[in-house]
Image (cartoon, grey):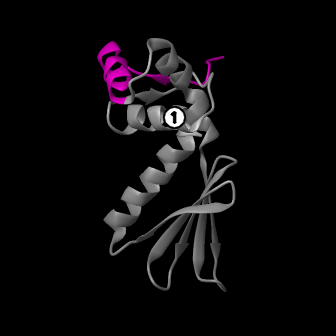
Amino acid sequence: MTEKRIYLSESGMAKLRQTFNVSHVTVWKALTYKTESALAEKIRYVALTQLGGTASKDIQKAVECETTHEEVARTMTQTFGPRVKLVYFKEGNFVRMYVDGKETEKAYCKDIASFIAFQKHVELTAMTQ
């Protein structure tokens, strides 16, 4: 069984150390989920979105997406793991991201491409939690 972790090149880890002005141990603990903090979440997010990090299968499985449609409310809800949720409002074309039940972001989606970009952002956020 694999451990929950983000794989990243040594040059990527060096970039994280420089960017966040932290030690090798701090980066390692963040990428191996040994530390749970706002800084660790930022390190993981940057590793995945900007430095080509790859999530272990445990992380990928943890953020599998479940989609439900609420026709009366005219919304679509996607749940990514136990903590992160995306809600798309069909009237108004906007989306909201919730982490632990609290709204953290809101965006207008003028087209499918902007929705997919926001959806990917939400998924990556779930991977860092």
Residue appearing at x 43%, y 51% in the figure: 120
- Whether 102 is drawn above or below 127: the answer is below
Residue appearing at x 58%, y 33% in the figure: 59
> Is 50 placed left or right of 97 in the picture?
left
Q: Looking at the picture, which amino acid does disc 1 mark?
A: Leu
How far from the left and from the top, in percent, is residue 114? 34, 65
Q: Quadrant of the N terminus?
A: top right
Indicate yes or no whether the magenta region holds residue 17. Answer: yes
Secondary structure found at label 1: helix
Residue appearing at x 34%, y 13% in the figure: 10
> Is 80 placed left or right of 111 in the picture?
right
Q: What's the magenta region? A: 1-19
How far from the left and from the top, in percent, is residue 46? 39, 36
Residue bearing the label numbered 1: 39
Residue sitting farthest toward the front: 21
- Whether 51 is drawn above or below 110: the answer is above
Residue appearing at x 40%, y 65% in the figure: 115
Indicate yes or no whether the magenta region holds residue 53. Answer: no
Other residues around mark 1 within 10 Å, as few (<14) / some (14–19) / many (≥20): some
> Is 34 placed left or right of 121 in the picture?
right
How far from the left and from the top, in percent, is residue 129? 60, 40
How far from the left and from the top, in percent, is residue 44? 47, 33
Can you tell which quarter of the image residue 50 is in?
Answer: top left
Q: How many marks?
A: 1
